[in-house]
Image (cartoon, helix red, strand yellow):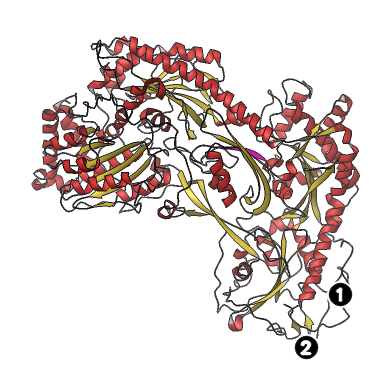
């Protein structure tokens, strides 16, 4: 929409055809400092936009708002200026000629997606298969060793010699218990050597043993376990001899003992170590088939105080035994049953859903009467719902209660008998005198198990031992169940980083006697780790280009490999579960690709999709080719992503050693002054090359190594070395042909540069390298990757989180990168092997911008003046007090402004500069918003509130309580008496109250969800005039895309009043709870569970269902522990035996 206006003076000259030389200038005399003057008001944008009559700018009656064709004329001048500078200094055409002149020095190779992805999938399969063979040898040996082992009732600690991985840390602790110190007599002291493969000090001659803190090392069960597992040491060693690439080999026992090889000291936390192998993701996956679990919690009036807190904590611990292959729901019941959360059906037991449950459980309140029937009917209805996604394997109900008399036999007859397809586990919680026989009967009559949780110390052990029951059908299935499974990605507890683990269950092959039934206990799980970095090494690194990559997903759609798999913090207690659709920007095409990969299909698809820039500030719409195949013998699928321009790549062929030496000399710092500074990508060029984060030091290491070896050496990657040296020579020729003879100052340039696929970034002149902040690895530089994906010139202002100091502007240290890809066409094959660009002097180009968006053609022409009696169009130079002129990039960040006080805001999101105008641009479709979630962020812990809902295990009496006789005769004292009575009569387990969590994870930096918002150009391409309607405070503006750039040219009246407050668009990353989980579970993403399920065996003996326990604790220990519980002090663990009689062979 044009705004008619009259112009004064001569007719407007035609578009400028030449580049305007512009010497560098200092600050304009009298320029307003950023801090001067009051802040300018923001106005609210009110649609609809109106067609405008001629409007004069308020307060400047001699001037009118520029007409549309005037501003289009300014835009053309800007486009031509940018294009002219890039043609002269960018050297795109000249670099094309240089490549063609050196055509004999390289070959053009093709990436064939199908062949590539099949080869990588085959290599990964071979890698994992070697680990599988080692696993099978270990599992077979373990079963035979245990079968041959003779149980010793009188075994003593001094009879067993082993390396206790936690011994050194415990010996260094002056507060260690004497009983723990006494166990050191049988502990080996080892020497260790540093091994970079393990990122740790190791000893290859021994295994190490880790025993959970809450398990007594001197118990008969543990000592027998240590005795027979010692024989595994030789098998571990032999496995490593056959495959030196093996990393941790681990046996996790059902008793809690972990024996791993090679030996290394345990990474002890600052506080109590609560690591228990049985709660690790890989153990849980290997020990049982997937589960559908309904947890029902008794919240009747009798459940109050400590008992309710114990139940809440127990449910949370129970949830931690579930993996992403499992499904769960949690409900509370009294007379009626209801879900504790917004989830009305079984949901996947992923990290975010479990978090919802854990928070909801804290809100449970005790009231009403106990109604087991309501609870069980709700649970059975949940398990019978076939209209939802679920595990469809083991089905179970976990009931937590303080006791009751009703056996609800009619419910079981209706829903579960005679087939008993649902197991029932009952948990008697707290100190009480109720008859537990009905709870025992419920479990025994439904193939489950009965547990007792009298105190917080009993929670961990008793919420995980149900896995032994679920493992029975696996053991009875024998060889059929001996199948290796591969886990999700998770953090290795010993510091190896991100790993996946192959798991294989180990079964008890003993029999109770001749002709007796086969033992049905699982001994444990064998595991072998594979570091993700080892798998990544099998993928092509640099032939795919900067924007090509390989990825892999599992049956849940979680990524195993992906360039965006970068967890900022990892908690070894939780797996790293990043969905493919969260690793990338989700769309329908990617959903289809993900489904096909999960189903194990092959496929290829070219799609147009959105990608996020490396610095997460921009969104680009691009073309990508996806190709995928399954990785045989695993649950993984491998994908390859290639941009069309990466179909081909260059492979240097520098057979001429004289030429090698010549080009290599241009890497020497002595050549930098004349040829420009060179940064080399920190790649693994040779095995003996020492890495360094300092590029100058890395280059020095590289040069020193190259003086000893040749680029054709077998210890070096010849492809990388040859391409690096070739690109060194090619970029030097660009200096020689283009850059060296040009005066950068004349055109207000701070630097010119070129970056290549080969890993060279050359900056000219040499001194400009001092202010170069881009990544020396082009593939990790945002400007490089964006230039490849966008045609034309890509502007990148400096990233500003805070205002620049005026001094920095005066010293010309602030520059704006402008880059573009170099596209070659060689024999009909197109590729983009390099990016070239310039670095603009911000201040000088801001002045030049004013002239180009004015009625002057060059700096020497006088500014046009209009008198009071005549009208002229405003321009961006003369009327900068009334007219705002800016260049904004495609992400909405300020690039240039005619307002001197905004120069230090260049690089900031424009809404922070002019919220009113940015909102109008967004509402008029110049920008589109894309919101997504980062599930890998790290957040500082939230300070606990006064009304925090975190579970507390004990009641803490005040001083007044101690002085009050009534308190001693109340529930607290009765609780003490009950504890004593309970231990003496019922012989139930009693444990110390351990610290809340190892190292208190709540106090550490933890993973969290961050909401990201990016903006990118919308559908509007034409020139556009509009009004921001706000009564007397209305503003005119004009916006137009600059051809062949990522810039938007905007001219607007400056706001004059603050009657209308504008809404502010936010671009900054913000903390978030993520998308609403209650809504997400209604449309779950496609997944598949493991293809095997062992939940039933006709020969299973269900008679062992928890009718008793084995260890009567001493009266003295009980009294002291209960006092510690009442006082709220963290007691140290006492010697406890955690075992069932069934653990014995």
In the picture, the disc for residue 862 is 1
- Left or right: residue 992 versus residue 929 is left
- Left or right: residue 181 versus residue 95 is left
Residue located 25% across and 21% down the image: 1142
In the picture, the disc for residue 302 is none
Q: Position of residue 813 (x, y in %)?
A: 73, 53
Q: Is residue 735 above or below residue 876?
A: above
Q: Which residues are magenta?
A: 547-554
Residue located 49% across and 16% down the image: 203
Q: Nearer the viewer, residue 1021 or 493?
A: 1021
* 552 magenta-colored: yes
Label 1 sits on a secondary structure element that is loop
Q: Position of residue 332 (x, y in %)?
A: 25, 49
Q: Spatial distance from mark 1 to mark 2, Cα to Cα?
A: 19 Å
Q: Position of residue 308 (x, y in %)?
A: 22, 46
Sequence-wise, which precedes: disc 1 or disc 2?
1
Q: Main secondary structure of the magenta part?
A: strand
Q: Nearer the viewer, residue 966 or 505?
A: 505
Q: Is residue 91 shown to the viewer in this render? A: no
Q: Is residue 640 above or below residue 1102?
A: below
- Left or right: residue 546 versus residue 100 is left
Residue at the spot of label 2: 868
- Mark 2 packing: few (<14 Cα in 10 Å), some, or many (20+)? few
Label 2 sits on a secondary structure element that is loop
Q: Is residue 67 above or below residue 847?
A: below
Q: Is residue 488 shown to the viewer in this render? A: yes
Residue located 64% across and 49% down the image: 613
């Amino acid at each position: 929409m044009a705004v008619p206006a009259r112009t004064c003076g001569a007719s407007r000259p035609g578009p400028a055809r030449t580049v305007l030389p512009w010497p560098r200038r200092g600050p304009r005399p009298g320029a307003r400092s950023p801090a001067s003057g009051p802040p300018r008001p923001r106005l609210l944008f009110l649609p609809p936009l109106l067609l405008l009559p001629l409007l004069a700018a308020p307060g400047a009656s001699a001037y009118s708002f520029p007409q549309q064709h005037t501003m289009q004329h300014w835009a053309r001048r800007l486009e031509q200026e940018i294009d002219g500078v890039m043609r002269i200094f960018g050297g795109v055409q000249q670099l094309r000629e240089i490549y063609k002149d050196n055509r004999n020095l390289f070959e053009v190779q093709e990436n064939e997606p199908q062949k590539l992805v099949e080869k990588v999938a085959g290599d990964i399969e071979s890698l994992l298969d070697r680990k599988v063979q080692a696993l099978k040898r270990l599992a077979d040996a373990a079963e035979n060793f245990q079968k041959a082992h003779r149980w010793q009732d009188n075994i003593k600690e001094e009879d067993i010699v082993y390396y206790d991985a936690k011994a050194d840390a415990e010996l260094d602790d002056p507060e260690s218990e004497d009983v723990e110190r006494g166990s050191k007599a049988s502990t080996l002291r080892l020497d260790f050597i540093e091994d970079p493969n393990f990122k740790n000090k190791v000893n290859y001659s021994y295994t190490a043993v880790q025993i959970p803190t809450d398990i007594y090392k001197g118990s008969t069960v543990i000592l027998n376990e240590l005795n027979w597992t010692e024989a595994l040491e030789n098998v571990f060693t032999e496995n490593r001899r056959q495959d030196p690439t093996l990393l941790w080999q681990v046996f996790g026992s059902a008793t809690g003992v972990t024996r791993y090889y090679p030996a290394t000291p345990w990474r002890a936390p600052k506080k109590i170590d609560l690591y228990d192998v049985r709660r690790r993701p890989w153990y849980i996956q290997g020990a049982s088939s997937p589960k559908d679990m309904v947890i029902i919690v008794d919240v009747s009036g009798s459940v109050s105080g400590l008992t309710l807190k114990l139940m809440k904590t127990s449910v949370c611990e129970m949830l931690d035994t579930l993996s992403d292959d499992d499904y769960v729901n949690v409900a509370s019941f009294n007379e009626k049953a209801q879900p504790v959360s917004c989830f009305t059906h079984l949901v996947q037991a992923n990290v975010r859903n479990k978090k919802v449950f854990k928070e909801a459980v804290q809100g449970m309140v005790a009231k009403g009467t106990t109604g087991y029937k309501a609870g069980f009917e709700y649970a059975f209805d949940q398990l019978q719902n076939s209209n939802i996604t679920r595990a469809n394997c083991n089905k179970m109900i976990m009931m937590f209660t303080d006791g009751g008399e009703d056996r609800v036999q009619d419910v079981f007859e209706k829903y579960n008998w005679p087939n008993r397809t649902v197991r029932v586990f009952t948990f008697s919680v707290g100190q009480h005198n109720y008859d537990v026989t009905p709870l025992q009967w419920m479990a025994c009559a439904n193939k489950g198990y009965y547990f007792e949780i009298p105190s917080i110390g009993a929670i961990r052990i008793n919420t995980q031992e149900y896995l032994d029951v679920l493992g029975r059908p696996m053991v009875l299935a024998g060889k059929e169940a001996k199948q290796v499974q591969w886990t999700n990605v998770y953090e290795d507890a010993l510091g190896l980083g991100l790993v996946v683990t192959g798991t294989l269950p180990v079964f008890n092959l003993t029999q109770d006697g001749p002709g007796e039934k086969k033992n049905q206990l699982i001994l444990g799980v064998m595991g072998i780790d594979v570091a993700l970095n080892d798998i990544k090494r099998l993928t092509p690194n640099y032939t795919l280009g900067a924007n090509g990559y390989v990825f892999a997903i599992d049956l849940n759609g979680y990524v195993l490999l992906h360039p965006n798999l970068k967890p900022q913090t990892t908690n070894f207690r939780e797996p790293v579960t990043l969905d493919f659709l969260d690793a990338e920007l989700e769309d329908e095409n990617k959903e289809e690709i993900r489904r096909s990969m999960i189903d194990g299909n092959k496929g290829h698809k070219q799609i147009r999709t959105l990608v996020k820039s490396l610095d997460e500030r921009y969104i680009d719409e691009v073309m990508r080719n996806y190709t995928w195949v399954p990785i045989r013998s695993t649950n993984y699928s491998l994908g390859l992503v290639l941009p069309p321009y990466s179909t081909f790549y260059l492979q240097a062929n520098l057979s001429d050693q004289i030429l090698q030496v010549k080009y290599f000399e241009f890497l020497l710092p002595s050549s930098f002054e004349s040829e420009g500074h060179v940064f080399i990508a920190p790649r693994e060029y040779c095995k003996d090359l020492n890495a360094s984060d300092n590029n100058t030091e890395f280059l020095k290491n590289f040069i020193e190594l190259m003086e000893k070896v040749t680029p054709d050496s077998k210890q070096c990657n010849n492809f990388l070395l040859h391409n690096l040296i070739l690109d060194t020579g090619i970029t030097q020729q660009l200096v020689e042909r283009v850059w060296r003879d040009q005066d950068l100052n004349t055109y207000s340039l701070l630097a010119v540069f070129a970056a290549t696929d080969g890993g060279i970034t050359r900056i000219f002149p040499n001194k400009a390298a001092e202010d170069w902040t881009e990544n020396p690895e082009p593939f990790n530089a945002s400007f490089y990757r964006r230039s490849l994906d966008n045609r034309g010139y890509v502007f990148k202002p400096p990233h500003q989180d805070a205002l620049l100091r005026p001094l920095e502007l005066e010293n010309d240290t602030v520059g704006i990168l402008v880059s573009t890809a170099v596209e070659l066409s060689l024999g009909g094959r197109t590729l983009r092997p390099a990016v070239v660009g310039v670095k603009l002097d911000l201040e000088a180009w801001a002045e030049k911008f004013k002239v180009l968006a004015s009625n002057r053609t060059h700096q020497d022409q006088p500014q046009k003046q209009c008198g009071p009696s005549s009208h002229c169009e405003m321009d961006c130079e003369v009327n900068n007090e009334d007219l705002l002129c800016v260049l904004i990039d495609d992400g909405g960040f300020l690039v240039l402004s005619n307002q001197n006080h905004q120069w230090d805001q260049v690089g900031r999101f424009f809404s922070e500069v002019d919220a009113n105008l940015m909102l109008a641009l967004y509402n008029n479709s110049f920008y589109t918003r894309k919101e997504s979630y980062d599930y890998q962020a790290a957040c500082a812990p939230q300070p606990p509130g006064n009304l925090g809902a975190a579970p507390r295990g004990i009641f803490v009496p005040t001083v007044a309580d101690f002085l009050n006789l009534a308190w001693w005769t109340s529930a607290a004292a009765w609780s003490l008496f009950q504890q004593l009575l309970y231990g003496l009569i019922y012989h139930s387990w009693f444990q110390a109250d351990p610290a809340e969590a190892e190292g208190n994870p709540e106090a550490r930096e933890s993973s969290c969800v961050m909401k990201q918002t990016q903006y990118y150009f919308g559908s509007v391409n034409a020139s556009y005039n509009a009004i921001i309607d706000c009564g007397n405070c209305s503003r005119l503006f004009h916006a137009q895309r600059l051809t062949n750039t990522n810039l938007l040219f905007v001219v607007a009246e400056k706001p004059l009043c603050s009657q209308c407050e504008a809404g502010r668009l936010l671009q900054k990353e913000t903390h978030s709870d993520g998308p609403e989980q209650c809504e997400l579970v209604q449309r779950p993403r496609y997944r598949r569970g493991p293809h095997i399920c062992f939940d039933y065996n006709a020969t299973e003996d269900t008679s062992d269902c928890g009718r008793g326990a084995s260890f009567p604790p001493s009266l003295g220990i009980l009294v002291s522990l209960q006092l510690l519980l009442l006082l709220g002090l963290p007691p140290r663990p006492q010697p406890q035996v955690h075992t069932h009689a069934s653990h014995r062979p």
